Image (cartoon, helix red, strand yellow):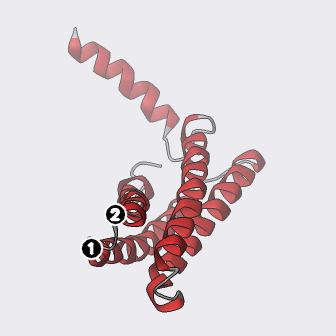
Amino acid sequence: MKHPVHPMIVHFPIVGWTVTFFGDVYQYFYGFKYSDIIQIVVTASCILAVIAIAAGLFDYMRQKPTKTVISAFEKHMYWALSAFVVFSIRALMPQLASVETLQLACLISSGLGFIILFYAAKLGGELVYRHGMGRDIGAAQSGSATNNDKSS
């Protein structure tokens, strides 16, 4: 595959959800100082995740995967969708939880989402670096030879 789209987009929800988790940790210990900003970040990250998920499916459909790649892709997809669901619940948390339990509920949901996200990202890395998904291996090998020739 020449130009996969998913790797270019997926960083945005990952960063947003990471900021959400650390923002929720800060909120839990220091209060609701930045709650509006964190709410915007988690909501925007969920919207961007929908785009990243669609791009991942699009990139996957352009491949001719083997059975092991299909299994690895499905694991990555299920864990990434789980992170999306947990952070979507986190985005709705101000409407779902009472004021007394809101900080703890936000912290628990974003903490769980962050752990799931970490594992999904690990599986995504394995798809690329172990299974070669999204890489045009023949072009990469010939490209590395021409790049070495140009540098000499």
Which part of the image, by quadrant, shows the C terminus? top left
Rendering coords of residue 86 (x, y %): 57, 72
Residue farthest along the left direction in this orientation? 151
Q: Splitting the image into 4 quarters, where does residue 85 fall?
A: bottom right
Judge whether residue 86 can be spotted in this image: yes
Q: Is residue 20 above or below residue 139?
A: below
Quick one: 8 or 4, which is closer to the camera? 8
Q: Secondary structure at mark 1?
A: helix
Residue at image x 49%, y 83%?
100
Residue 22 left/right relative to 147: right
Q: Is residue 112 above or below residue 42?
A: above
Q: Secondary structure at mark 2?
A: helix
Residue 120 left/right relative to 102: right
Say which amino acid is labelled 1: Ile
Quick one: 38 or 126, which is closer to the camera? 38
Residue farthest along the top direction in this orientation? 152
Between disc 1 and disc 2, whose residue precedes?
2
Residue identifier under label 1: 37
Alpha-carbon span between mark 1 and mark 2: 15 Å
Residue identifier under label 2: 30
Judge whether residue 62 can be spotted in this image: no
Residue at image x 59%, y 62%?
112
Rendering coords of residue 17 (x, y %): 42, 62
